[in-house]
C-alpha cells in the first residue's frame, strides 16, 4: 500500500480514480501528531501546506497542483521528489487571460461602476446625440472601447499555458510575438524582451517565478511599453516591480490586468487597489470546478504510475526550473 | 456631383477615401432650414437622426451604419433606398460577446466590486486555508469562476456577426448550436429554439429586431434555459421580454449579460440595474475607433458605386428583413 496524504476537506468523488493500492490518509488542518505518508498532495493554501508538512514523516513524493512550485522549494528538504501541476492550469488560466484582456479593452470595470450607480453613459445618453471632436472622438460616435482585432500581443513565457493562450487568440486577428528563456523557432530569447516591448499593444506575463524572473518586469521595461498598452500578469506578483507598475498606472501611461500581486493578499491600504485602468482579481484564475477535476485526475494518474513503479511525470528539476 | 449629407462633427480624416464627385454637405445638429442631399449618412443617435431627416430634401439613398435598421423604418418614406451596415459590426460586436461571456463566467463584476472596497477574497484569504465542503466547493479550493471550455453555446441568429462570434469561440473547446430564421446546413430553424434551449449553457441573441423577433425571447423561453445558464443579448433590447428576464434573475435561475435593454437608456429606477448576476453595458459594443474606420470605408465604397452607377450593396429589402 501507498499512504497518500490528502486534506480532510477534499470530496471523495475527486479521488474515485485513485488506485486500490492507495491508502488515503486524511490530514486535518492542524495535525495533532506526526503522520506517515509516502505521497503527499498539498492544499492550495501555501501557509496551510507548510503547517501540515511539518507534521509529515516519510514523504517521498509531493504532487503539487500549482503550475509554479516556487512557494514549496524553500521548505521542502532535498531528496523528496516534487512534481508540479503542469498542464492542469492551461484551460482556466488561458481563459482568464483572454477574459482580462477583453474586459480591459471593453472598459467593463468602468461600466460595472456605472451599473452600481444606475448610470447609462452610452451613445444614446450623449446630450443631443453628438460629441465634439477631440482626441479619441473622431466622429459623432464616442469611442467607449477598443478592439482586440489588429493588436500586437507579446506573450512572455511560452510553456503550455502560453500555447493555450495563443490557441484562444487565434480567432481574434492579432499579431503574436513570443519570448521565452531560450530562443526557438518563432520564440525570441528573453534578452530580446526590451526590444520587443515597444512593438506590443498587450504584454502577457506567464513565466514561472524563479530567481531569474523575480522582479524581471522592472520600471525600465514598463517604460518601454507603448503608451496606453495593457500589461497582463497571470504569472506571479513578484515578477513585476509593483511600485513601478503603480507609478505607471497613476501617470496614465499604461493599463494593467492582474490576477497576482506582490504582496498577496493585497493589503487594503495598497495603492494598486485604486490605481486607474487596473483590473484586479484575487488569484482566482484556476478557481474552477473543471480545474479540480483535472487536478485530481493528474494526481490519480501519478499514483497509478507510482504504485506500478513507472517514472512520474512533471518532476521538478533544478535544471528545468 | 453627388450631395452627401454628413454630421458636422465627423472628422475629415474619416472621409479621405470619398470619391471626388462627392460634395460634402455638413449637417448641424439642428438644421435651420431645408437641405438638399442625395446620399445621407445618419448620425448614430436615433433621435438626432430623425430630427435631422425632417430637414432633408431629395434623399435617394440612406447609408446607415447600424447592423439593424429597425429604428429607421418607421419614419423613412417608401422610395428611398436604405442600406445597412452589414459587416462593419462583425469584429467589435463579436468581441463584445466573447468579453461578456468570459467576464460573466469569471465573475469579473464581483471582483470589481471587491476591488472598489479593497477586498481580496481569493484562496489565500480563506481562514486557515480550508473551506468546508458544501455545494460548489468539492475540495479545499473555493470555486470562484467557471470555465468556458466544454460548454454548449447556442447562437440565435446566424448572420455575419454570428459567424464572427463562432470564429472567436473556435479556440475555446465549446460545442456550438445554431438557430436562424431559415434552417440550413448546421443551422436549425427558429422553430426548434424551444427544444434546443435546455441543451445550452450559454445562449447568445444576435438577431435583427423585426416584427418576428420583437419579444421573441419570452418568459417561456427563459424558463426552458438550464438553471444557471447565461443569456447574452447583443441584438436589441425588445427581443427579450424584460420583465421575465428581471424575474428570472431575481429568482437566481439564470445569469445575463446585455449590451442592449428595453427601454434604452435604462432609467435609473429600472430593476434590471440591480438584478443579481447581470452584466450591463450601455449599448457600446460597436463604440471602437476601428469600427468608425470600417464604417466610413463602407460609406466610401458605396459612394464610389453610386457615382459610377453601379449597384449598391447592403440594400435593405422587406423580404430580407
Image (cartoon, coloured by chain):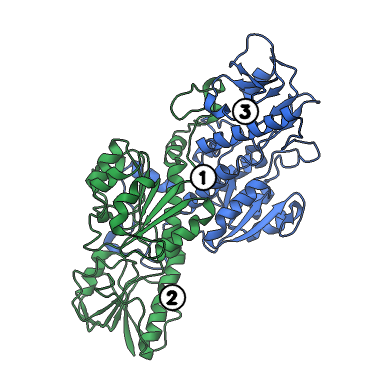
Chain colours: A blue, B green
- Which residue lies at the image location 74% right of the left edge and 21% below the top edge? A59
Q: Indicate which label's residue lies in the foreground, 2 or 3.
A: 3
Q: Residue furthest top?
A: A33
Quarter residue A38 falls in: top right
Please give the label number shown on residue B297: 2
Q: Indicate which label's residue lies in the foreground, 1 or 3.
A: 3
Please give the label number shown on residue A278: 1
Question: Depth check: B267 or B272 in front?
Answer: B272
- Quarter containing the N terminus of chain B: bottom left
Same chain assignment for discs 1 and 3: yes
Query: Dot 3: within a 10 Å radius of its alpha carbon, few (fewer than 14), some, or many (20 or more) residues?
Result: some
Question: Depth check: B144 or B148 in front?
Answer: B148
Where is residue B287? Give x, y as percent.
40, 60
- Which residue lies at the image location 48% right of the left edge and 38% below the top edge? B145
Compared with A151, A272 (above or below) is above
Query: Dot 1: within a 10 Å radius of its alpha carbon, few (fewer than 14), some, or many (20 or more) residues?
Result: many
Please give the label number shown on residue A18: 3
- Relative placement, left or right, of B238 versus B178 is left
- Relative placement, left or right, of A261 versus A117 is right
Amino acid at each position: 500500500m501507498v499512504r497518500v496524504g490528502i486534506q480532510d476537506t477534499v470530496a471523495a468523488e475527486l479521488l474515485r480514480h485513485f488506485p486500490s493500492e492507495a491508502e488515503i490518509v486524511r490530514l486535518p488542518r492542524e495535525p495533532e501528531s506526526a503522520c506517515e505518508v509516502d505521497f503527499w498532495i498539498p492544499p492550495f493554501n501555501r501557509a496551510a501546506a507548510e503547517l501540515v508538512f511539518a507534521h509529515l514523516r516519510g514523504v517521498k513524493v509531493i504532487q503539487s497542483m500549482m503550475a509554479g512550485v516556487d512557494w514549496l522549494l524553500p521548505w521542502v528538504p532535498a531528496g523528496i521528489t516534487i512534481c508540479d501541476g503542469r498542464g492542469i492550469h492551461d484551460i482556466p488560466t488561458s481563459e482568464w487571460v483572454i477574459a482580462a484582456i477583453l474586459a480591459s479593452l471593453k472598459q467593463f470595470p468602468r461600466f460595472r461602476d456605472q451599473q452600481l450607480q444606475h448610470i447609462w453613459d452610452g451613445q444614446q445618453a450623449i446630450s443631443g446625440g453628438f460629441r465634439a471632436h477631440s482626441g479619441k472622438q473622431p466622429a459623432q460616435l464616442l469611442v467607449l472601447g477598443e478592439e482586440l482585432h489588429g493588436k500586437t500581443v507579446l506573450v512572455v513565457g511560452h510553456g503550455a499555458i502560453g500555447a493555450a493562450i495563443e490557441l484562444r487568440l487565434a480567432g481574434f486577428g492579432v499579431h503574436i510575438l513570443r519570448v521565452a528563456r531560450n530562443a526557438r523557432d518563432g520564440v525570441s530569447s528573453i534578452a530580446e524582451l526590451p526590444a520587443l516591448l515597444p512593438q506590443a499593444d498587450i504584454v502577457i506575463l506567464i513565466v514561472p517565478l524563479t530567481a531569474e524572473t523575480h522582479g524581471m518586469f522592472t520600471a525600465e521595461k514598463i517604460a518601454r511599453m507603448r503608451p496606453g498598452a495593457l500589461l497582463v500578469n497571470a504569472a506571479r506578483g513578484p515578477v513585476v516591480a509593483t511600485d513601478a507598475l503603480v507609478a505607471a498606472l497613476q501617470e496614465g501611461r499604461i493599463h494593467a490586468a492582474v490576477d497576482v500581486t506582490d504582496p498577496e493578499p493585497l493589503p487594503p491600504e495598497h495603492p494598486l487597489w485604486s490605481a486607474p485602468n487596473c483590473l484586479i482579481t484575487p488569484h482566482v484564475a484556476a478557481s474552477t470546478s473543471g480545474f479540480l477535476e483535472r487536478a485530481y485526475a493528474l494526481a490519480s494518474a501519478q499514483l497509478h504510475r507510482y504504485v506500478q513503479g513507472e517514472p512520474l511525470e512533471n518532476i521538478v528539476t533544478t535544471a528545468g526550473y
